[in-house]
Image: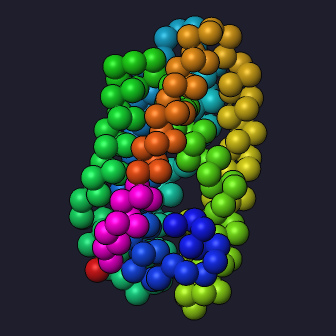
Amino acid sequence: IFQQALEGRVTVPLYCAFLAQAFHHVRHTVPLMMACGARLGPDHEWLRGKLVEYIEEEFGHQEWILDDIAACGADAQAVRHGAPGHATEVMVAYAYDLVNRGNPVGFFGMVHVLEGTSIALASSVAENLAESLGLPATAFRYLTSHGSLDVAHVGFFRELIDGLRRPEDRAAVIHASKRFCRLYGDIFRELQQEPAPCN
């Protein structure tokens, strides 16, 4: 799908379907960070402080996605009150399970995959989509903001990982990164199989 976007071969319904699934996982970003912070022990107090900063930056981003959907002429409220696709639901469920059952530091594996992808592709994809789909700039706030915003976030992530001294914490992030690589990819694979419009 990223390749199709870069080549101008994505349709408005497919773009809306992508935004719908983005809404259904982004809406859990702040609750997941809060859950992660709640499970960190006293030796990770510095990391809890980092999460507080991160929560402030991420709060409300799911509303940007709904605005983008509305700017595409689709029904944003149907997305808000609708259900996620199978792959999205599984990825979100794994994230909660990871935080609540495993090492909560592994949550940053999700951060690594989602924001690393944003840096690599979001801005260029948004430019190509705007040109090929003929949609207004207001339909791309989520992509354009995250392309630039996540550059700072990856710097934040690097600083955070450098601060992890326990081998088991670093291993948890690496393990989760591998899982989220596949889970996030499944969302895009599912979109290619069955692109459902959001209205």
Q: Which colour scheme is used?
A: rainbow
Figure quadrant of residue 166? top right
Say which quadrant the C terminus sits in. bottom left
On whether residue 17 falls in the magenta region, the answer is: no
Q: Where residue 194 sits in the image (x, y, percent)?
A: 31, 69
Residue 118 vertical position relative to residue 156 in the rendered view, above or below: below
| Left or right of 179 on screen, residue 159 | right
What residue is drawn where x is 52% and y is 67%?
A: 1
Pick the residue in front: 128 or 96: 128
Q: Where residue 59 sits in the image (x, y, percent)?
A: 50, 50
Residue 181 vertical position relative to residue 133 in the rendered view, above or below: above
Q: Give the range drawn in magenta.
A: 187-197
On whether residue 188 falls in the magenta region, the answer is: yes
Q: Is residue 33 visible?
A: no
| Left or right of 186 on screen, residue 42 | right
Figure quadrant of residue 193? bottom left
> What is the total number of numbered labels drawn onto the structure image?
0
What residue is drawn where x is 45% and y is 83%?
A: 12
Q: Can residue 16 be seen in this view?
A: yes
Q: Where residue 42 sits in the image (x, y, percent)?
A: 53, 9
Q: Is the magenta stretch mostly helix, strand or loop?
A: helix
Figure quadrant of residue 5? bottom right
Q: Where residue 25 sits in the image (x, y, percent)?
A: 40, 51
